[in-house]
């Protein structure tokens, strides 16, 4: 396991993905942060682009839950293995993935999210 503050940061950050509070989530990111995930493989840059995307994404998924599985420190931040539980209609999908995170002043400056998005379609 990594340093306790990395783990604590991940628990607080992942909790901000639940409950449809995009401004809370955005508070974990720098003004010029870069973010990419399977739905946005070319990525988004900057607070306004992230605000628009996070607002739509969190509104569509207010009940999903994310939890850290393993946090591995890197030179610029950490790599995070996570588990997500996502309500998908009448079913609930559980999936695992990986984030590559770079930090600047204790906030996320780069966040690349990797997981098999086909599991969401199967749910």
Image (cartoon, rainbow, N blue to C red):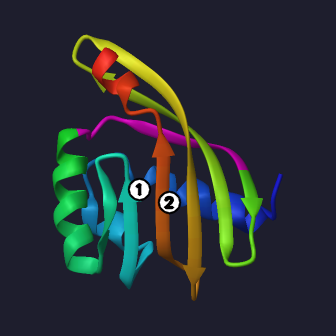
Q: Which residue is mark 1?
A: 16
Q: Nearer the viewer, residue 15 or 57?
A: 57
Q: Is residue 110 above or below residue 104?
A: above
What's the mark number on residue 98? none
**Mark 2 packing: few (<14 Cα in 10 Å), some, or many (20+)?**
many
Determine whether, in the image, residue 26 is placed left or right of residue 116: left
Q: Look at 27% across and 58% down and name the residue there.
A: 21
Secondary structure mainly formed by the magenta segment: strand
Quarter of the view holding residue 16: bottom left
Q: Look at 72% across and 68% down and name the residue there.
A: 5
Q: Nearer the viewer, residue 72 or 90?
A: 72
Quarter of the view holding residue 10: bottom right
Q: Which range is magenta?
A: 61-70
Q: Look at 22% across and 17% down and name the residue there.
A: 89
Verify CB contact (< 8 Å) between mark 2 and mark 1: yes
Indicate the position of residue 46 as horizontal and vertical percent values.
Answer: 29, 80
Q: Which residue is mark 2?
A: 13
Indicate the position of residue 29 as horizontal and vertical percent values.
Answer: 42, 75
């Amino acid at each position: 396991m990594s340093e306790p503050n990395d783990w604590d940061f991940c628990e607080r950050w992942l909790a901000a993905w639940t409950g449809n509070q995009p401004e809370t989530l955005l508070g974990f990111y720098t003004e010029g942060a870069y973010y990419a995930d399977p739905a946005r493989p070319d990525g988004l840059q900057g607070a306004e682009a992230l605000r628009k995307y996070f607002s739509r994404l969190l509104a569509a998924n207010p009940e999903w839950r994310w939890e850290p599985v393993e946090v591995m420190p890197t030179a610029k931040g950490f790599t995070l293995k996570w588990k997500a539980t996502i309500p998908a209609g009448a079913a609930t999908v559980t999936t695992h993935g990986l984030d590559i995170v770079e930090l600047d002043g204790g906030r996320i400056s780069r966040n690349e999210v990797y997981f098999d998005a086909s599991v969401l379609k199967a749910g």
